[in-house]
């Protein structure tokens, strides 16, 4: 089962996200990652294996900000690799996901036909791409979220962060 953490603060959140993930380690996982908004850009750091690997990489990449989401992944679609680790993102949105999107193959094919590219083997990446598609067609982030949710079939929980 995956673990999801989100923090909005007045202080830097990277280490607090790591601490949150450590509290969820008992659930089991094969990879972990965080995404943080900094200077109006989404920055992401992911690692295969233990949270200590993510923490070490984060120390090298110096990513921090006051808004962030984090995730521990237990693979259901795709191998346990860094590319398949969450968060999944586009330029404008990052998502973390727990659950299964049953119709992801059809959605993926539909998005590829519209020119979208995929970089993972997961069902989760479809969500980030749908949000990006609907954000361009919508008046608000909330409307894009509702349009995305209308397309998804399955049982899931999401953390969504727009820049």
Image (cartoon, rainbow, N blue to C red):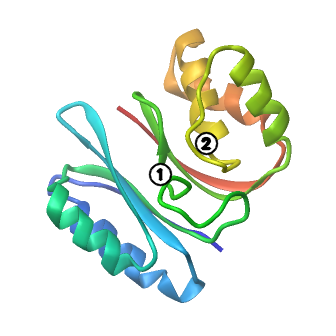
Which mark identifies residue 125? 2
Residue at 42 percent across and 83 percent down: it is: 23
Would residue 109 be found to the left or right of residue 15 on screen? Answer: right
- Residue topped by disc 1: 87
Distance from disc 1 to disc 2, alpha carbons, whole Å, reads: 9 Å
The percent coordinates of residue 147 (x first, y second) are 70, 25
Is residue 159 depicted above or below 54 in this figure? above
First in sequence: mark 1 vs mark 2: 1
Element type where label 2 sits in the image: helix
Q: Of 149 and 107, which appears nearest the observer?
A: 107
Element type where label 1 sits in the image: loop
Would residue 71 be found to the left or right of residue 51 on screen? Answer: right
Would residue 27 be found to the left or right of residue 10 on screen? Answer: right
Q: Residues within 10 Å of mark 1 (few under 14, many from 20)?
A: many
Which mark identifies residue 103? none
Q: In terms of image quadrants, where is residue 115?
A: top right
């Amino acid at each position: 089962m995956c673990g999801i953490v989100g923090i909005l603060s007045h202080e830097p959140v990277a280490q607090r996200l790591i601490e949150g993930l450590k509290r969820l380690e008992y659930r089991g996982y094969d990879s972990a990652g965080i995404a943080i908004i900094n200077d109006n850009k989404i920055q992401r750091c992911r690692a295969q294996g233990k949270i200590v690997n993510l923490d070490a990489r984060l120390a090298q990449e110096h990513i921090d900000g006051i808004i962030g989401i984090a995730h521990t992944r237990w693979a259901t679609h795709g191998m346990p690799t860094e590319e398949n680790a969450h968060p999944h993102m586009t330029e404008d949105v990052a998502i973390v996901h727990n659950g299964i999107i049953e119709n992801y193959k059809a959605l993926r094919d539909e998005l590829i036909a519209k020119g979208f590219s995929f970089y993972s083997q997961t069902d989760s990446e479809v969500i980030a791409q749908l949000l990006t598609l609907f954000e361009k067609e919508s008046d608000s982030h909330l409307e894009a979220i509702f349009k995305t949710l209308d397309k998804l079939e399955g049982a899931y929980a999401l953390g969504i962060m727009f820049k």
